[in-house]
Each structure stands twice: as structure tokens, then as C-alpha cells.
Amino acid sequence: MTGFPWLTFLILLPLAGAVAVFFVKENRVRVTALSVTVADLLVSLPLWWLFDASSGQMQFSELAVWITAPPIHYRLGLDGVSLPLVLMTTVLMPLCVLISWESVDTRIRSFMAMLLLMEGAMIGVFAALDFVLFYVFWEAMLIPMYLLIGVWGGPNRLYAAIKFFVYTLAGSVLLLVAIIVLYFQGGHTFDIVQLSEGRYSSSLQLWLFLAFFAAFAVKVPMFPFHTWLPDAHVEAPTAGSVILASVLLKMGTYGFLRFSLPMLPDASHAFTPLMVTLSIAAIIYGAYMALAQADLKKLIAYSSVSHMGFVTLGLFMFNIQGIEGAVMQMVNHGITTGGLFLCVGVIYERTHSRQIADNVGLTKPMPRYAALLVIFALSSLGLPGTNSFVGEFMVLAGTFLWSKIATALASVGIILAAAYILWMVQRVAFGVPSPASLPKLRDVSRREMITLVPLVVLVFLIGLFPNPILTRMHASVEKIIARSIPPPREPVTAVSQLDRLTPPVKQAALAVGKVHQP
Amino acid sequence: MTFSASDLFLILPELLVVTAACIVLVLDPVLHASRKDGLAWLSLGTLAVCMGLTASQMDHPATAFGGLVVIDAYGCFWKLLLYFVTGLTVLLSYSYLKEERLYFGEYYGFVLLALAGMMVMVSSADLLTIYLGTELMSLSLYVMAGLKRSEPRSLEASAKYFVLGAFSSGILLYGISLLYGATGSTRLPAIAAAISGRSLDDPLLLFATILLAVGFSFKLAVVPFHMWTPDVYQGAPTSVTAFMAVASKAASFGAFLRVFVEGLGGLKTNWSAIFLLLCVATLVLGNSVALVQTNLKRMLAYSSIAHAGYALIGVVAAGRLSGAAGGTNGIASVLLYIALYTFMTFGAFAIVAMLRKGGLEGEEIEDFTGLAKRHPLAALLMMIFMVSLAGIPPTAGFIGKFYVFMSAVEAGVTWLAVLALIFAAVSAYYYLRVVMVMYMREPGAVTATSPRLVMSPALTIVLACAVAGVVIFGVYPNPLINLAAQAVLTLK
């Protein structure tokens, strides 16, 4: 580990960039934003190799006093769970700038500033190790996102923007109270690592879990708190949709993983049936809704609800397959859905419609585009060899250990995913285009290629070689699982049970050989 | 009663302010119209000198005039805040009065007199002196509220403010007299000594406490004693509204906390219950009614009512917490909250004041439509103020809310924090509506009557100070937190 403040640099660079775009010439704004996001990506890449995969500890830690009374610190660090998410964010942001290159032409300075502010805040959320600092980053991104949807969004943007804002704010206010309650119950500290090591009474855990749930479930969004998502996705500009789907939703599941599971293990176990039910409901309901959509963005939005259901399902399995699968699925959903939204953005720039009916038969006029779309689509339905397969398979394997019925129900979601995705691809790629739209259907430009190809590479790279990610998260996930298994009140083993029995029975049992003395 | 010359030195800031006020009032009729700007500069200069004096007094507690006046860090905290607000008011008025064609030299005189009243309120340890300060402040404000003589709304505001203000002063005075009857003194330390060990079983004490609470509630604009606020805030000239919403509220909180903590501290579990009721009513009503306002001044009036509710959470918590450290945490959160509230509320009113529609003020929310297109910087500032008022990090508003909620949870009223936070989410809706019309609606064609913002160097300074406070204390609040914590330590 080096002493270089990697994470502060990662957070401050985009924030400085957000200020800088107001001071460069109008025609340099896009280039400036792109340079800043690419620079941030380049700074973040070394972390991948500097990260010590054998340790489940927080790495690249930074600590500074922020407020003295009560002790609130500027405390940052990454473990194997947050590292992939930070890298996913830094990979996606240059693409978001690129896809907005021509499609956004009003108030370009403010737009790029909002994207950069979002980047800083999102990295901050994944890197924060002080609960108040986490909350500040968590809330700070509401306003930029609100403006992204409300200023640069579609026709119904005002409604979508305020709905997004009120839903997420209403969810997260309870989180603040929970944080304060934890402070007083957990030894007067906001240190996330320290709070994760405490034990809290069951009734307190219950209330705190509900408060966390309100914040995280809205953000994920879990069924039935998902209704803001389709509106926000449809109305947001392409870059906004990508950020929403790829990063913002992960903040909810990250919250469950970072806070609910290790801090409130008993309550998490108690709520597992509910969480599994809601997850499976989201998987099936989201997929069904996706089947019925005529709008491409809405279809992907509902598919997100379905896919995020797999993540929450995996998290609450408390086994290594389930949780690692969930983290994989978080990263993969970011890549695949990000790719799909970028694809929709590309076609929207040409036909100015997101309706499937207006965008049919693109293979002939736009062969390269169709190829890219099909790759992302197949990844989205979890074809083996693509990234999503790894995550979904691991989640299902983890679920299988817990309940076979739940696994069977969740698998229905995969079948439905195949149905809505393939049906969409069939219409969009292989239909007969209307002659009127043909002149507008230029194939993807070089800029758009540069935007989409990195994600295609990642789709196959993770699909074929998932191990680098898995090994990095392994130690951290094991640590979380170790926390979330409640310590037995007294060690209950077969032998200790036997010791209570009368000697003859014990001997008989031993003789039968059902129990072996260690 | 005897006093020495050194006592006069201790109240030098008050003397200076009153002197400056008199000079302004005397010079106004004799000065040529073109030189009346000098009066504003004289006021500012006085404030700067006082600020230096008070800052030097902060670490040297003293009492003067046989205990009528106390100089302590607590009083100095409020005074510094009041100088700051008054300075901003003078600067804002300097532009605003010209735009409104209100040429009254007395204006600055009244501002300074009101300030003198507020300074007396926060630094006296005797109920009658506090009452005196309250009256000096209120009388000056009654006049200022009605300064737009040509406008019926302004006159109505002034009359309404006067009638209800006089009524509430009467209640306050009645409470003081009952308390005198019950304890035999109007000095806060003597009252505290007299009621130690007594409870509200004594009907005299009960009525005195309730009447004092009601009297101060009028001044703080706490529900259900808030009825005057929306009309007065809307009708008064906007620079005066800003001054009332911020300075008068700060001074009232200063005096109110001193009376209830220093004087009636022995009854704190009892008054805490009273303020709990008022607090809940204020939070619910203030935020709910603000939702349906279309006039920005009126909305900000309800918003300021709601913010008094948030500050009251700290008071409730202070009353429920036992032990010296716990109680001061609650009070410190109130100080911090009001100090941070100052920046954002004043900033918002300053922008409202300078938005002109033809010759009139553009104070409807609709008038802000498309402001981001015409005045991007002003719209950005307004957005920052609104976001801060809604309490979203990383702004000052969040820090203020965080600390009152901390004290609420510490005091075991977690449900109150939950309720307040839910209403904070509600409040985000009406604050963001302003952001929405500024950024997300297209402005119509520009005509002579379409709203435009009148910028001036003085206004620029006001906005710069306000936004700097909101942003800097949002990101690095430590100095202010320590100052507030230090200030409450001197509150006995």
C-alpha cells in the first residue's frame, strides 16, 4: 500500500472538473469533461493491481478529522466489494460523456458539471467509511440527478424528476435517524468498520433494519418501491439513465451489503423470508412488465427491476455463492444495462423515438449497431460466456442451498428474460424497417463505437474470466458472512448434545456410528 | 442601585449603536439627498467597530449594573450574529430602497435601534430589561414594516404586526409579573434560586411559565401563535422581512433560551413538554401550509415558521436531557441551527428583494420562471439557498438539522426526529418547486414587465456572504460548532 491519497484524488478530480468546465471555452467543454473522466479512470486503474486480494481489510485508507464533536471523520477505504464498484463507475463515466457529445446541446457546461459532480459523489459513497460522510455523499447526488432528469430530460421530465427526488429523499431520511441512533448505541462513533463489529439488541436491530430498508429498498429499487424507476429512466437523458441504472441502483444493494448484513445480522436473518419474497416478486414482476413494454427504455427499466431482484436475493442467502454472485451481478448489471441504455441513446439520436415500433429492422441499415445490441441483449438474458451468466448462476447456486422452491421461482425470471429480450431483439434487429426512416439510420459513428466497444470487451472478459473479480472480493465477502452468522449462544454440536444423554444411549449411538467423536 | 463607569464601558457596543442611530436620525433631515448614502456607510462602520468590541469581550465574562446586564460568550455569540445580519440588511436595503424609491434616512436609524433592542435582549439577565429590549426591537420593526406607505399591504402588515405584537408583549409582561409574584424577583439567578425544588404544582408558577412561553412563542412565530407571520412577512418591504425573519428570530431565541435555561431551568422537564407540543404543531403546520403557497415571500414565511420548529427540537431535547453536558448539547444545536438558518434565509430573501417585475417586486414563484436562462448565477445561488433550506448535504442546512436530530435522539425522543425528518422530505417538495421553475420551465418572451434581477455591488456582497456561509459551513462547520459549544457553556 502506498501513502498516496488515491481515493481523495478520485473524488476531488471530478469535483474540480465540475468547476473547471465553467471556465473553459464553450467548444472545449466536452473535451475537458472527457479528459477529466478519463484521467479519473486512469487514476483508478492502478488500484486494481495494488489491491491486496488476500486481505479482507479496508485498503487505501485515509483518515482526517472533519468535525470534532461529535467525532465525524473524513474516512475512506476500499475492500473487495467496493473496489469493483468504484472501477465500474470510473469506467462508465467517460462513456456517459461520450454518449452526450452531440445529443446534449443546451447548457452543455452545466450538464457536464452535473455528470462530474455525480461521479465524485458516487465514488464517495462507495469509498466512505464514516457513516455521516457516507450519508453526505449519498444525499449530495440527489440534486445533480434531479437536475439531469428535470432539465435535460424528456417531455414528462418534471413529474419524473420530482418523483425520483421525493421517493429517494423520503427513503433516506430514516437512514439519517438510524445513523444517529447507531451512534449512541454503538459506542459513540460513526466509524463504519467499528460499528460493524458491535452487537446490538434484537429489538434495536429490528428498527434499524426497517430504517435501512426504507433507504436502500427505494434506491435498489425493490418491489413494490420501484415505481419511480421507469419514470426516471424514460425521462432522463441517456447519460442520466446509464448513471441511474448502472451506479445509483447499486448504491442500494451496496447499502444492504455494507450496513444491513454486518451491522444487523440477527434482523437480517429474521427478515430473510420477506427479502426473498420481495426479491422473487421483483424478478418475476419486473420481467412480466418488461414483456409488455413498447418503449425501449421502459423495457430496460423493468428488466433492471428484475435483475436487481437477483442481487437482493443473493445478498440475503448469507453464503459465499449468493453474496459473491450478488456483487458480480451488481457489476454485470452496470455493464450490460449501461450498454443497453447507450444503445437506446444511439438509436434515439437518429429516429427521435424510443418506441420499438419506430425502430424495427436495423440489421440491414445499421449492421454494426445491431451486432452490439444483440451482444448486450444476450448478456442481459444471461447467456453463458457473457458476464451476466456468472452472476446469475452464482446467485441461483447460492439460493439452491437455501431453498429449492425459491430457486425454481427465480429461474422463471431467467426464462421470462429470454422471452422479453429476444422478442425485443427480434423486432428491433430483424424486422422490416419503414422506408421513411431509412435515410436517418446511419450506422454507429466512430465516437459511438468507442463508447460501446469497451463495454462489449468487459461483457466477454468478465464472462470468460470472472476469477480476477471473485478473488479480489473473496476475503471481504467472507468477513461479511462471518459477521452475519450469529455466534451460537452455546456451541451446539452433535457431540455436546450427546453429552447430555445418558451414557448407555451415548454409547449406543457411538456404536451405531452415526456420530464420530472428533 | 449604583454603577460605575466601567459598567458603561462594558455596554459600549450598545451605546455605540444607539449613538449611531441618533446621529442617523438627526442628520437625515439636514443632509442633502445625494449624500444620504453616507448614513448607510456610517451604520456599517458602527457595526464593524461593535463587532471588534464584542469579539474581544467574548472571553471576558462580566456583569454590569448590578446584574441587569451580563457580558458572556452566549450573549456575544448572538450579538456577533446580529451585527452580521444587520450589516447584510443595511447593504441589501441600500440597493432595495433605491429600487423601491423609498427615501427614508430614518430607515437606517430604525435598523440600528432595533439592533440595540436585540442586543439588550440577548445580554440581560433581568426579565424587565429583556422586556425593554423586546419592545425597542418590536417598535422599530412595526415602523419598518409599514415603510411602503403607498402600498395598502404594507400598512396592513404594520398594523397587524403592531396589534398582535402589542398583545403578545402584554402576555409576556403579565407572565413576568406573575413570576415576580411567585419568586419575588425579576433577576434570572434569583428566580432560579427561588424555584429550585418547586414544581408546577404552584398555580402561580404554572401560569407564569405558560404565559412566558406564549409570549415568546409569538415572537418566535411558533404555531399556534404564528398567525401574524405570513401577512407581515408578505406585506413588509422585503429587506425588512429579511431582517425580521432572521435577526428578530435570532434575538428572540437568544432571550428565550436564557430565560428558560437560566431562570426556569429548574422546571425544564415541565416546559420541555410544553415546547414538545408547540414543536410538533409548528413542524406539521409550517411545512404543510408552505406546500400550497404561490407567493414566494409567503412561502418563505411559512418556511421560517417551520425552521423555528426545527430549532425547537433542540430546546425540547435540552429540557429532557439531564446533566450539564447533555443539556448544553441541545442548546448548542439551537444556536448552531439559527446561525446557519441566517445565511440561507437571508440569501433567499435578498434574491426575492432584487427580482423586479416592471416597477414592482417579482415575488410570485411564477416570476422565477426561467431565471436560470437570464441570470444563471443568481439562479444557482437561489438553488443553493433552497437546497440548504431543505436540509440536503453538503449545505449548511444539513449540518443544522443533523445537530438538532442528534440532540433529539440523545434525549430519547427519536420519534420526534423521525417526524421532523419526514416533514423535511415534505419541505424539499416546495423548496424544489422554486428550483423547478427556475431551471426547468422556459421563460416567455422578454417584455418590459417580465421579471429581471437588479444587481448592484452591495447586493453582490450580500449574496456572496450568504452563499459563502451556506457552502463553507456546509462543508467545514467545525469553527461554528465549536463557537456554539463554547457559547452555551456560559449559560448557567
Image: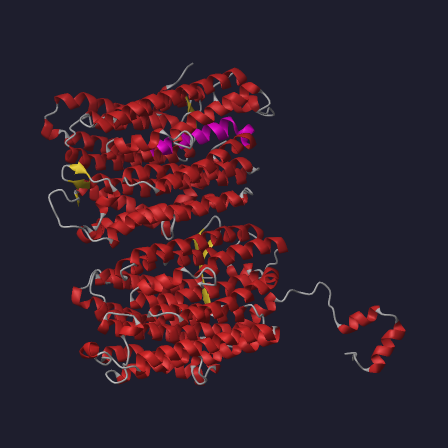
- Vertical placement of residue A422 versus B145, above or below: below
A355 in the magenta segment:
no
Which of the two residues, A19 or A451, is positioned nearer the viewer here?
A451
> Where's residue A372, x and y in %?
32, 81
Which of the two residues, A201 or A150, is positioned nearer the viewer here?
A150
Most distant residue in the top direction: B1
> Where's residue B428, x and y in %?
37, 48
Q: Is residue A386 visible?
A: yes
- Vertical placement of residue B53 versus A22, above or below: above
Magenta residues: mostly which secondary structure?
helix
Relative placement, left or right, of B375 versus B448 is: right
Which of the two residues, A296 or B371, is positioned nearer the viewer here?
A296
> Where's residue B471, x and y in %?
32, 50
Q: Quadrant of residue B365?
A: top left
Report the magenta residues as a range: B247-268
Q: Is residue A6 visible?
A: no
| Residue drawn at x 28%, y 84% as measured from the top left | A363
B266 in the magenta segment:
yes
- Vertical placement of residue B474 versus A145, above or below: above
